[in-house]
Protein backbone atom coordinates (compact mmCIF):
# COMPACT_ATOMS: atom_id res chain seq x y z
CA UNK A 1 0.00 0.00 0.00
CA UNK A 2 2.81 2.42 0.85
CA UNK A 3 5.58 2.40 -1.67
CA UNK A 4 7.75 4.65 0.49
CA UNK A 5 8.57 2.97 3.87
CA UNK A 6 9.34 6.43 5.37
CA UNK A 7 5.65 7.31 4.92
CA UNK A 8 4.53 4.81 7.56
CA UNK A 9 3.05 6.67 10.53
CA UNK A 10 3.08 10.06 8.79
CA UNK A 11 0.37 12.10 7.11
CA UNK A 12 0.18 11.00 3.49
CA UNK A 13 1.55 13.25 0.79
CA UNK A 14 0.23 11.11 -2.05
CA UNK A 15 -3.21 9.75 -2.88
CA UNK A 16 -3.86 6.15 -1.91
CA UNK A 17 -6.49 3.94 -3.50
CA UNK A 18 -7.74 0.85 -1.72
CA UNK A 19 -9.27 -1.46 -4.30
CA UNK A 20 -12.39 -3.55 -3.61
CA UNK A 21 -13.11 -1.64 -0.40
CA UNK A 22 -15.99 0.48 0.74
CA UNK A 23 -13.50 2.61 2.67
CA UNK A 24 -12.32 5.56 0.64
CA UNK A 25 -9.50 7.41 2.37
CA UNK A 26 -9.28 11.15 2.08
CA UNK A 27 -7.03 12.08 -0.77
CA UNK A 28 -6.27 15.63 0.33
CA UNK A 29 -3.22 15.77 2.63
CA UNK A 30 -4.24 19.25 3.85
CA UNK A 31 -7.56 17.90 5.18
CA UNK A 32 -5.70 15.03 6.85
CA UNK A 33 -3.31 17.50 8.48
CA UNK A 34 -6.25 19.61 9.72
CA UNK A 35 -7.93 16.52 11.14
CA UNK A 36 -4.73 15.47 12.87
CA UNK A 37 -4.28 18.96 14.31
CA UNK A 38 -7.88 18.92 15.55
CA UNK A 39 -7.37 15.51 17.15
CA UNK A 40 -4.18 16.68 18.88
CA UNK A 41 -5.89 19.84 20.14
CA UNK A 42 -8.91 17.88 21.46
CA UNK A 43 -6.68 15.27 23.09
CA UNK A 44 -4.56 17.93 24.82
CA UNK A 45 -7.65 19.79 26.00
CA UNK A 46 -9.18 16.59 27.35
CA UNK A 47 -5.96 15.71 29.18
CA UNK A 48 -5.81 19.20 30.72
CA UNK A 49 -9.45 19.02 31.84
CA UNK A 50 -8.80 15.61 33.37
CA UNK A 51 -5.95 17.14 35.37
CA UNK A 52 -8.17 19.98 36.61
CA UNK A 53 -10.92 17.57 37.68
CA UNK A 54 -8.43 15.25 39.34
CA UNK A 55 -6.87 18.16 41.26
CA UNK A 56 -10.29 19.42 42.37
CA UNK A 57 -11.20 16.02 43.83
CA UNK A 58 -8.20 16.01 46.15
CA UNK A 59 -6.45 13.01 47.58
CA UNK A 60 -8.17 9.69 48.14
CA UNK A 61 -8.86 9.08 51.84
CA UNK A 62 -7.74 5.48 52.31
CA UNK A 63 -9.13 5.34 55.86
CA UNK A 64 -12.59 6.45 54.65
CA UNK A 65 -12.55 3.81 51.94
CA UNK A 66 -11.20 1.07 54.21
CA UNK A 67 -13.98 1.53 56.79
CA UNK A 68 -16.82 2.51 54.46
CA UNK A 69 -18.90 -0.61 55.16
CA UNK A 70 -18.39 -0.37 58.92
CA UNK A 71 -19.28 3.34 58.93
CA UNK A 72 -22.52 2.66 57.06
CA UNK A 73 -23.39 -0.17 59.42
CA UNK A 74 -22.90 1.88 62.58
CA UNK A 75 -24.73 4.87 61.08
CA UNK A 76 -27.70 2.59 60.35
CA UNK A 77 -27.67 1.37 63.96
CA UNK A 78 -27.62 4.93 65.29
CA UNK A 79 -30.57 5.97 63.15
CA UNK A 80 -32.57 2.79 63.91
CA UNK A 81 -31.98 3.19 67.64
CA UNK A 82 -32.65 6.95 67.38
CA UNK A 83 -29.43 7.84 69.20
CA UNK A 84 -27.95 11.33 69.42
CA UNK A 85 -25.07 13.12 71.10
CA UNK A 86 -23.09 11.15 73.65
CA UNK A 87 -25.30 8.07 73.19
CA UNK A 88 -24.41 7.93 69.49
CA UNK A 89 -20.74 8.54 70.30
CA UNK A 90 -20.75 5.73 72.87
CA UNK A 91 -22.28 3.30 70.37
CA UNK A 92 -19.59 4.20 67.81
CA UNK A 93 -16.78 3.69 70.33
CA UNK A 94 -18.21 0.32 71.39
CA UNK A 95 -18.56 -0.63 67.73
CA UNK A 96 -14.89 0.22 67.17
CA UNK A 97 -13.89 -1.96 70.11
CA UNK A 98 -16.00 -4.91 68.95
CA UNK A 99 -14.78 -4.64 65.34
CA UNK A 100 -11.08 -3.98 66.04
CA UNK A 101 -11.04 -0.53 64.46
CA UNK A 102 -7.71 0.88 65.57
CA UNK A 103 -8.17 4.62 65.13
CA UNK A 104 -11.36 4.99 67.19
CA UNK A 105 -11.22 8.78 67.43
CA UNK A 106 -10.77 9.20 63.68
CA UNK A 107 -13.54 6.70 62.91
CA UNK A 108 -15.86 8.36 65.43
CA UNK A 109 -15.22 11.87 64.10
CA UNK A 110 -15.73 10.75 60.52
CA UNK A 111 -18.95 8.91 61.35
CA UNK A 112 -20.37 11.82 63.34
CA UNK A 113 -19.53 14.19 60.47
CA UNK A 114 -21.30 11.88 58.03
CA UNK A 115 -24.31 11.70 60.35
CA UNK A 116 -24.50 15.48 60.58
CA UNK A 117 -24.86 15.69 56.80
CA UNK A 118 -27.18 12.68 56.43
CA UNK A 119 -30.19 13.17 54.16
CA UNK A 120 -32.72 10.98 52.34
CA UNK A 121 -30.58 10.77 49.22
CA UNK A 122 -27.73 9.17 51.16
CA UNK A 123 -29.46 6.34 53.04
CA UNK A 124 -28.75 3.59 50.52
CA UNK A 125 -26.57 0.99 52.18
CA UNK A 126 -27.46 2.07 55.73
CA UNK A 127 -30.25 -0.49 56.07
CA UNK A 128 -32.80 2.12 57.10
CA UNK A 129 -36.02 3.47 55.69
CA UNK A 130 -36.80 7.07 54.90
CA UNK A 131 -39.34 7.08 57.75
CA UNK A 132 -36.64 5.95 60.20
CA UNK A 133 -34.37 8.71 58.94
CA UNK A 134 -37.10 11.33 59.26
CA UNK A 135 -37.83 10.25 62.83
CA UNK A 136 -34.13 10.42 63.68
CA UNK A 137 -33.79 13.84 62.02
CA UNK A 138 -36.79 15.18 63.94
CA UNK A 139 -35.29 14.03 67.23
CA UNK A 140 -31.89 15.44 66.25
CA UNK A 141 -33.48 18.83 65.61
CA UNK A 142 -35.24 18.59 68.98
CA UNK A 143 -32.01 17.84 70.83
CA UNK A 144 -30.09 20.73 69.27
CA UNK A 145 -32.72 23.36 70.06
CA UNK A 146 -33.14 22.47 73.71
Image: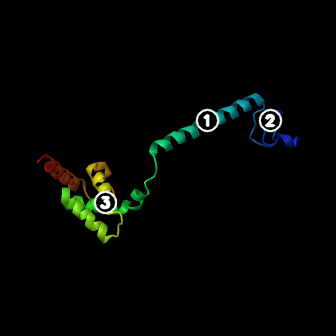
Q: Would residue 101 be found to the left or right of residue 135 on screen?
A: right
Q: Give the foreground label among 1 and 3.
A: 3
Task: Report crowding for label 2: few under 14, some 14 to 19, many 20 or more residues within 10 A (C-alpha).
Answer: some
Task: Identify the secondary structure beneath mark 2.
Answer: loop
Q: In the rendered view, would you say 76 is above or below 10? A: below
Q: Give the foreground label among 3 and 2.
A: 3
Residue at 27% x, 64% y: name it. Answer: 93
Residue at 73% x, 32% y: name it. Answer: 32
Q: Nearer the viewer, residue 77 or 99?
A: 99
Residue 55 position within the rendered picture, expressed as x and y whole percent measured from the top left: 49, 43
Which residue carries the number 2 mark? Answer: 12
Q: Residue furthest left?
A: 146
Which residue carries the number 1 mark? Answer: 42
Residue 100 position within the rendered picture, expressed as x and y whole percent measured from the top left: 35, 70
Q: Let me know if residue 44 appears in the view.
A: yes
Q: Would residue 57 be found to the left or right of residue 21 on screen?
A: left
Residue 9 position within the rendered picture, expressed as x and y whole percent measured from the top left: 78, 42
Inter-mark Cα distance, 2 to 1: 21 Å
Inter-mark Cα distance, 1 to 3: 47 Å
Picture quarter with the N terminus: top right
Q: Nearer the viewer, residue 25 or 54?
A: 54
Inter-mark Cα distance, 3 to 2: 65 Å
Amino acid sequence: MLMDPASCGNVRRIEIDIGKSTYKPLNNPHVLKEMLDLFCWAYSRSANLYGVVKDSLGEVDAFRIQYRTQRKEVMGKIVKQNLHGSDAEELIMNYCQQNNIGEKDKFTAMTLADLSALHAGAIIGLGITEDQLNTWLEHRAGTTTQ
